[in-house]
Amino acid sequence: MMTTIPTHPKKFLLSTLYSFARHTITGELTFSFIKIKKGMHVLFDIKGHLRLMRVLNHPQSARITVSHPKLAFKYLDDYVSLNLSTKNRLSLLVAHYSFLQNKFKNDFLDIMENRSIQLWIDHINGATFTLKMNFPKKLHSEGDICLTLIKDDKFVYRLIFVVADGRSFDVADENVILISSIQGVYGIDSVKATTKACHDIHPTHMLMAAVSGIGMTMGIGTILGIKTKHQIANNGNFYFSYDMFFEQYGEMIEAHSLYRIQLPYAEVPISSIKSNHKKRTMEKRIYKNEIIAQAGQTLKKYLI
């Protein structure tokens, strides 16, 4: 049965509040999300919340908001990074969905939620590797766009990000990509097999290649990456270091505790690579450039 989406902003707000309450009462949303102190922010900044509701009432995002009622209120709880204030989280949510509405066709989020977008595919030695982009239904407190690397039908690694206003982080760019999650999904054996098959490129770097293609296609020139200690799912037992990973790509913005990475990624000149490593390095770069190009070309189909 198709959900009817109210077109009037006030009716849309009431519909979303009703849906949120219904999901809470039926147990689909836990009361751990409802923190009175944070919830009072809606009353103190009703203009900010109404601004968000007007953005989410857009034809592109209205249906996904009704399907996922927590989306309109998730800025009141942990969202994207542990070191963000409630005001910054609200601004982030507004910036992300405003950007999508200005860049992509109205059916973009429906496709992301219900099917996913295949950005890249390769067949190697009988195995099929794909990179897909979708809305992370169960993980959207970490961000609103998820890239997943898949080997055959098994998820290998995923990366989650949002589009943010760069000025909120003292970056000159109007829009930036903020990466909030990079996690293995299926197990170490799957990661090793994927790395070996794909020119010894680790899945995390394949995902970063896809992000590069996405960013440049959207006209974005800067990526921001969070620190390990600010990752929402960090329970103290992390084996993946966001700090060490992002240090390979960029530099720290101390004031915001974020890593800044420029697009396209900086590379060591091939003349500086040892002669016995040059061929392997070139093969890796060619492969990653193919991912960048294919991801970018695919995404162009969905732009306005």
Image (spheres, rainbow, N blue to C red):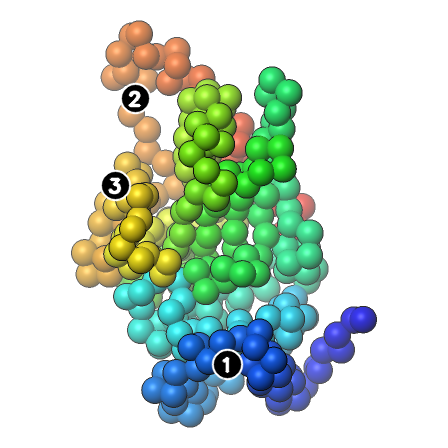
Secondary element type, mark 3: helix
Which comes sooner in the sequence, label 1 or label 3?
Answer: 1
* Residue that carries the numbered disc 3 in the rendered image: 244
Task: Give the residue displayed 59% in from the left and 43% down from the top.
Answer: 132
Mark 2 belongs to which amino acid?
Pro
Mark 1 belongs to which amino acid?
Arg
Secondary element type, mark 2: loop
Real-space Cα separation, disc 2 to disc 3, in angstroms: 22 Å
Mark 3 belongs to which amino acid?
Met
* Badge 2: residue crowd in 10 Å (few <14, some 14–19, many ≥20): few
In the rendered image, is residue 94 in sight?
yes
Choose top left, top right, bottom left or bottom right for residue 42: bottom left
Task: Classify residue 196 as left or right of residue 275.
Answer: right
* Residue that carries the numbered disc 2 in the rendered image: 269
Quadrant that contains the C terminus: bottom right
Residue 64: image location, x then y, percent: 63, 68
Real-space Cα separation, disc 1 to disc 2, in angstroms: 47 Å
Q: Which mark is residue 51?
A: 1
Which comes sooner in the sequence, label 1 or label 2?
Answer: 1
Real-space Cα separation, disc 1 to disc 3, in angstroms: 37 Å
Q: Give yes or no for contact between labels 1 and 3 (Cβ–Cβ under 8 Å).
A: no
Can you tell which of label 2 and label 3 is closer to the viewer? 3
**The furthest residue to the left:** 254
